[in-house]
Amino acid sequence: MIVNDGKATDKACVLIADKLRSRDIDCFGFVPFSVCDVLNPKLLPDGIQSVIMIAVPYDVGGYDSDGVSKYAHVFDYHLLFSELFRSLIPDLESAFPGEKFYGFSDHSPINEKKAASKAGLGRIGRNSLLIHPVYGSYIFIGAILTSMRIECEPLDVSYCLDCGECVNACPGHAIRVSGGIDPDLCLSAVSQRRHLTPPLLELLKKNHIAWGCDVCQSVCPLNRGAKNSSVPFFCGSRHGNFTSSEVSSYSDDEFRKYAFSWRGRKRIVENLKNLEESDHSDPGKEEKSGI
Ligand code: B12
Ligand code: SF4
Ligand code: SF4
């Protein structure tokens, strides 16, 4: 039986699908490794035949005025994927004796977004993000590479409406007309730099950014009506507005639960202070943001 999505009827796929769903993972698809683009051969295990692509929605709703983007308002997705892989991979290896399974997210040997599109998980936007038909682009991506041969028919990579809304709205002018972004100009990348000069802090302040940026997602018509996440890991960890004093007072263990922790405490605290200063110096701010 040939399959390429989570509605698998093949016996092996049904078993894998059940194991994913029992761990709150509902969006996944299968793709032959032969059609994946290898970006980092050093990370590639031997004998890979197939890839299970996973998308996990993270937008749990709610309004934030702290300048921290949606993805960082819930617990770090690296923790979700490492917990998932820690329990799922031994389970798969005992269900399919002799086969190997390797989990990745972010530092993957393959181009994850293209593989996900070929596995039926959505289209690639001009803003470079994968856009799921139900959850929009507010998803995280993970991949399981396996030695197991899973019979599946890849789809062609599909692209967005190419309406240009994200290009026009991008505060860093970072989105290339031909698709993809220039990471040096992206304000999400700027907010994550180790050192920020006063002009860069001013640029972040002007755009009300403390960590990450959601502009190219919030204007995208394909995100209108996107369904909120019901993944317990994210729903249960939704944080309200972060403040510099609160983040400063976190224990190291608490701090490590958030995606901004990878850059150390100084960066996020300084970035939050940067905006808090501007809130104090602009008396109309509270009114404008509807607080
Ligand atoms: C480094 C990195 C960053 C850097 C650089 C991002 C970049 N695009 O280069 C910075 C810090 C800026 C960043 C920011 C963000 N990131 Co980031 N980031 C990554 C990481 C670790 C590697 C990206 C990479 O270099 N890929 C390799 C290159 C080859 O791929 P690419 O640049 O995406 O190339 C695509 C485009 O060029 C496009 N393309 C090419 N030609 C054409 C032509 C047309 C017409 C079109 C439409 C498209 C198109 O197709 C290519 C293939 O997908 C990925 C994880 C991963 N493995 O993908 C996460 C990842 C992309 N990030 C993610 C997130 C959530 C974000 C932010 C939304 C966070 C935030 N709110 O601030 C922003 C979004 C910025 C943006 N618009 O991309 C998610 C995105 C999920 C999704 N829906 O796609 C990922 C996949 C992490 C994950 N594991 O879930 N990120
Ligand atoms: S995240 Fe912000 S700065 Fe980066 S490409 Fe998207 S809109 Fe532009
Ligand atoms: S805003 Fe338009 S061009 Fe940008 S990703 Fe969405 S559909 Fe594509």
Image (spheres, helix red, strand yellow):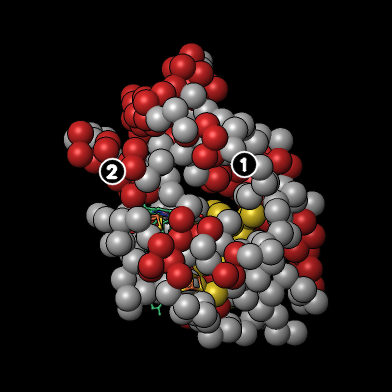
Q: Secondary structure at mark 1?
A: loop
Q: Is residue 133 left or right of residue 44?
A: right
- Residue 242 is situated, as x and y percent measured from the top left of the image, at 52, 28
| Residue under the image location 53 percent in, 66 percent down | 220
Q: Where is the C terminus found, in terms of image quarters?
A: top right
- Number of on-image labels: 2
Tell me, yes or no, if residue 262 can be seen here: no
Query: Which residue is nearer to you in this view: 103 or 68?
Result: 68
| Residue under the image location 62 percent in, 41 percent down | 63
Q: Amino acid at mark 2?
A: Leu
Name the residue that disc number 1 marks.
Answer: 63
Q: Secondary structure at mark 2?
A: helix
Q: Is residue 112 left or right of residue 192?
A: right
The picture quadrant for ligand 2 comes to bottom left
Tell me, yes or no, if residue 227 can be seen here: yes
| Residue under the image location 45 percent in, 70 percent down | 165
Vertical relation: 54 (above or below) 234: below
Name the residue that disc number 2 marks.
Answer: 203
Label 1 with label 2: CB-CB less than 8 Å: no
Q: Quadrant of residue 95?
A: bottom right
Q: Residues within 10 Å of mark 2 (few under 14, many from 20)?
A: some
Query: Which residue is nearer to you in this view: 254 or 287?
Result: 287
Q: Amino acid at mark 1?
A: Tyr
| Residue under the image location 58 percent in, 84 percent down | 155
Q: Within 8 Å of ligand 2, the CB of disc 2?
A: no
Query: Which residue is nearer to you in this view: 90 or 193?
Result: 193
Separation (CA) of disc 1 from disc 2? 22 Å
- Residue 176 is situated, as x and y percent measured from the top left of the image, at 31, 71
